[in-house]
Amino acid sequence: MNGQIGVYVCECGPNIKDRIDIDKVLEDISSLENVKVAKRFPLLCSNDGKKFLEEEIVKEELTHLVVAACSPREHEQTFMTVCKQAGLNPYLFQLINIREQCAWMIPDKEQATAKAIQYIRAGIQRVAFHRPLEPKEIDSIPDVCVIGGGISGLETSLSLAGKDRRVYLVEKTDSLGGMAGKLSKLLPYQGSELSSVEAKIKQAQDNANIEIFTSSEVSDVRGFLGNFDITISSHGESSEARKIQAGAVVVATGFGLYDPGNDSQYGLGQIDNVITALEFEEMLGKDKLLLKSGKPPKSVALIHCIGRKELGYCSKVCCLYSIKFAHRLKDMSSDMDVTELYMDLCLPHKSDQAYFDEAKEKGIRFIRSGEDVFVKNKGTQIEVEYDRDGQKDSITVDMVVLAPAMVPSEGTTSLAEMLNIPLDKTGFFKEIHEILDPISTPIEGVYIAGCAVGPRNIPESIVQSQAASGKILSSLIPGKKIKPEVKVSEIREDFCTGCQTCLSICFYGAISYDPIKDVSVVNEVICRGCGSCVGSCPSGAIRSKHFTYPQLYREVLEALR
Amino acid sequence: MSKAVKIQQSTEDGLRSFFESLLQNKTVKGIFTLRKTNDEGGISYALITDVEDLKNAVPLYPQMPTNAGKILSDFTLLEPIQEPVAAVLRPCELRAFTELVKRNHGNLDNVLLISLTCGGVLSLKSLRGGNGTKDLSSYWESVGKADLAPDIRETCNTCVQFIPQNADMVIATVGQKDMDKECTIFATTPKGEEYAQAAPGSTVSEEMENEKTQALMDKRSEQKATSLETFKNNQSGLKALIKTFAPCLGCHGCRQVCPICLCHLCDFDSKTLEYQPVNVRSELNQKGGLKVPPGNIFFHLGRMSHMAVSCVSCGMCSDVCPVNIPVATLFSTVGDALEKVFEYVPGRSLDEPVPEGTYKEQEFVEIGEQ
Amino acid sequence: MNSTHKDDKSEGMAGKILPAEDGITSAIITFLKKSLEEKQLEAVMIPSKIPDTEAWTWLLLQDESLLASCNPLPPVMTVQGGKALSNVTKHGDLHEKVAAVMRPCEVQAAVELLKLKQIDLDNIYLISVDCPGAMPLQDYMADPEKTAKAFEEAFSTWGENESVRPICQICHQFSLPLPQQSAPSDNSPPKNEAKFPAADLHIGLIGGDGTNVFLIPATAKGQDLLDKLDLSAEDSMVNWESKVEEIRERKFNKRKAADAEWKAKTEGVDNLAAVFDDCINCHNCKSACPVCYCQQCYFDSQLLQFSPESYLGRAEKRGSLRFPLDTLLFHVGRMSHMALSCVSCGACEDACPMSIPVGQVFTMMGNKTQDYFAYTPGLDRNEPLPLQIFKEDEFGEVETPREGAEAPAEETEKNV
């Protein structure tokens, strides 16, 4: 290797200087064959330090740079920039951590020095095998495709369109609004008028930046962040397909409702006047809350937590809306007998507790009935049996309203496959981190918002929609070039037999198959450099740039010498 | 006259004593030679570093499980050995190593090259299972008498290069009738002389090539001439080649064990030469039939054209062939002819450049001229 | 390159009978000739003897006259049929209707290669034949006449013949694996049992008493080919079916016994090393194996090249170091890469110059690992390769320690 490696040891103020015998380090390192120069400097990350390095690179005509200092997390980028400025490819550089990994953890100076020397030697061996890597830049398309025209989809579209982004809004049914649009009234403190949803629909329709596709579905997605090719197919006889290009995708496909089935304990579909919350909502909206007999009910039981045990999660909103229903019933007639049966009560928000207390004051009964609730016919009425603390009890009512759990909407699985994003155990789209990164997916440029991710209420969906649009607005800027990961995988075509094992292993969908060359191909924009494909190839035809076999082997060999 | 060390032990025991002193004096870090893995089973090459383990060494065992030149090449491929190591190789293995070093596939630094006047090796098939207990008395008797030994590889039978040329030390076996009593090791370079000092024996002056070795040389030359005649009569021409390679499975084992074949990915295993559907169809249509897998003769002729000029006639290829094709005989014969044309002897000297890497304005005129 | 397609297994088996007055080989060749003449097929891939030699090769032919030297069941296997077919269709469809007449394990290998995208089976009719086994290749090379004669006897001592290769003696896939007729009562998936036939058409020799040969369609494609030819129908395959089941059961039990035997013989590093003691690292086993498809084997690559000081260091640690290095690593590594797809064809064992029972050892390993994943290689084209699918709960035997499991045995330093 005709390398001229320069090694610079940072004193890091007293941090390294006091704990490691730097002169001894330099003495040892200088004796190595391919090391042209080995020097020390007080603080390499300072402006003076960076200037010094830049000058050294040029003066000594270095082909590779090794800096022994702090953690790469601190200053790898700093020194890579220095390299670039000095005209040296920034990947021909290695930062050796002799601060956190030597000086700061080994009290004995001799031992710390020995370890530092070992590490630096190993790093020198590695850097000799580094190859220059060129970061790529690709054009990005600032437009966005939003899948789902419910409250989340609308909010996202309006947010983006408001910042002059072109939005393609794709809705499966023939109208916008989704589930929120079916509500007759929102909760009092959420704004009491339905018109808020209607208003958003109107805004979206009037906005020239938003192109709306109803009775349509996304049938094909190809590409990657900044460069998605999306096909939108419409239902119906004409069934045209329209191809659009977008830089990001937001999945806001909402939810469906759990169907307990026709022979469940709840009597849905078998006993008259047992209805779901959605049906109740619709009746309220038409101002026609009537029994099958045509008369208005005098007593109503609202059963929460339908499907919670089977599905294993709480749907969060049902308690609140059931209480909302109870209030509405009491508003219709103060004599109305209203009972709520629940497993657990979920009242997490600021105003919820007060709302609940009000309900109790109105005489609405709350019974913690557990799982064993059975709905049976009793003449023209309905008997609801339940188990309270081991005691069986029952109430007789005219109407039963079931609050079924939220489930993923139809088509979730195929959409997930199409976008190559995962679903979690519950079947909803899986966010990268439930707490710390709730709207991103492993696929860059694809976001998820609203109930598509799991049960949540309208304010939460709005927040997520705005978050998604915020992320897109800040990362996908018109005219901005995308700089994808540099340390990606590469396939040696001569060794690839096209068995597509790597393709099936790649979680990011970064590998595709070229049928003409009969090889797998890595999309360097989508590849995250995780290395799973490198491990999966039985012959070793794929390798990782910047983590090649000689680089790793040489480093380890030297470290273990 | 050459300098030699005479140890008053059987040749094999004497060798072990020599190796013992080399290891104990720390003059070398390890001895690379043949070794028994256990009392019933296989013989393989090994690098022995522990004196205690030397009792398992069988340096003269007439078997070549792999060409040692290839192993040494792999050993020193990435970089030279930093500490001295002694290696015992047969003449053809040493020549193979030399050829590989010329192609930058190996390094001679710090290697003490010990070879032997070689009576040949038995075919692998005759040694399968129970190697350790095979009766070798008839073999050693022939070698001691400088006769053609029975059951040795075809290429050994016709080998006239059995006296090594570039070794530091040479163990005498051919024509040595007292191998059960004495061990004679020639020191043929200054380096060899230096290491010979560690041998527990007395220094003598002797001729490495004598009338006995000449006798074997004559017998072998005769065999070689006969083999060439047979080849010319039975094996030349495409028809003969088809018959010879008829049973070939295309396993490429011959290529795998050949010391000269050094490509990381052989052209004939690469995608370049894979058949596309259009190739299959066109051949099928033209001739009405196509042998599958196709490209059999092409592989062998191709490999020949790539390496025959350096063929050291070790015979590994024939031994590894599952269908007993006499690959080695064929390649060796063609190799010899090629070598004559280019006046090249593989492994003769490190300074002799490989023919395909040299350019002479006037060359191979027999083909060039009308 | 086609991907795995939806299998079209036929519901009933409406086979046909082929009269075989001039012998089985003649009957089959006549059937193929007829198919070529009537243009139901455009080419045939079948073993052929090479003129003036005793050697066998695969022949892809259009010219019917070449069928004269062909035989669907030569005494030896030579190149594995699946590998041969992959060789000519690796880069795509030949766009000609080709019948490939092979032994059942060769058909299985072809199906595995389909899943590995190394073969194109569009336009290929896979035709398997009841197989009595194959003779050891090296016996045949040593004495072709004697070996061929011994092979003839295998047809009459079906399933009991001890001169065929040991791996054939324990083979229970020697006939058409019958499609599962009904689900087992405990609803568990059957292991090592066929779900779908791999071949399109199967030639049944068992139970035909030498005067008849059964042509059994196993897929709609095979049925289609058969229907187009003018042959008399056979109304009952019962005789063939029952006889096959009888032999299959016997062989399956033999196989289980062999598994136990080989497990004991190879238990622990020392025992395994002893079995591979003679190995010279020629890698013929890998080259002959139909499902070893890598362009360059990992174990031949530069990823296993180390510096001389590593070698010297290892040698010093143990007192001596065997060369070529890492013999066991190669075999165990190859096992870990392909055991799930091992179809027990024995090509590896035939190719070994040192007569190591590679095939038998790999068969045992293959059986065991395939059991763990409830996977049978080469039968169901739609059954995905275990390596390529992810299940959250899998391989519990290894992931979660069993209660009362023994502590691992002490490690021995073995110079291998």
Image (cartoon, coloured by chain):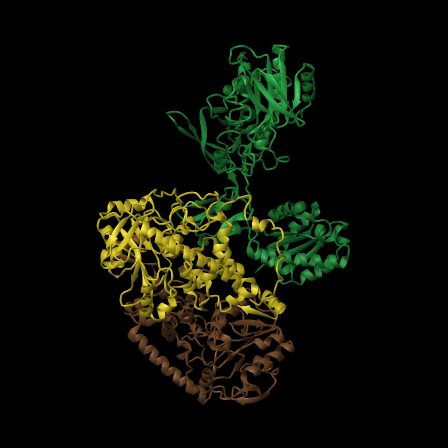
Q: Indicate the quadrant where residue B54 lies.
A: bottom right
Asked whether residue A191 appears in the rendered view, the answer is no
Residue positioned 34% across, 68% down in the render: C147
- Left or right, C208 with respect to A210, comes to left
Q: Say which of A497 and A302 sits in front.
A: A302
Q: Check the image and report above or below for A545 versus A195.
A: below
- Give the colour chain B carries in the figure: brown
Q: Indicate the quadrant where residue B334 lies.
A: bottom left
Where does residue C141 sit, x and y in percent of width and height? 35, 69
Q: Say which of B9 and A202 sits in front.
A: B9
Q: Say which of C358 and C243 sits in front.
A: C243
> How many badges with numbers are in the image?
0
Residue positioned 53% across, 86% down in the render: B180
Name the image quarter holding the C terminus of chain B.
bottom left
Where does residue B87 sit, x and y in percent of width and height? 55, 75
- Give the colour chain C carries in the figure: yellow
- Left or right, A165 with respect to C379, comes to right
- Left or right, A214 with respect to C408, comes to left
Q: Indicate the quadrant where residue A319 lies.
A: top right
Where does residue C101 sit, x and y in percent of width and height? 32, 54
Residue positioned 47% across, 45% down in the render: C189
Where does residue B46 sit, x and y in percent of width and height? 55, 71
Q: Check the image and report above or below for B354 versus B279.
A: below
- Give the colour chain A carries in the figure: green
Asked whether residue C266 appears in the rendered view, the answer is yes
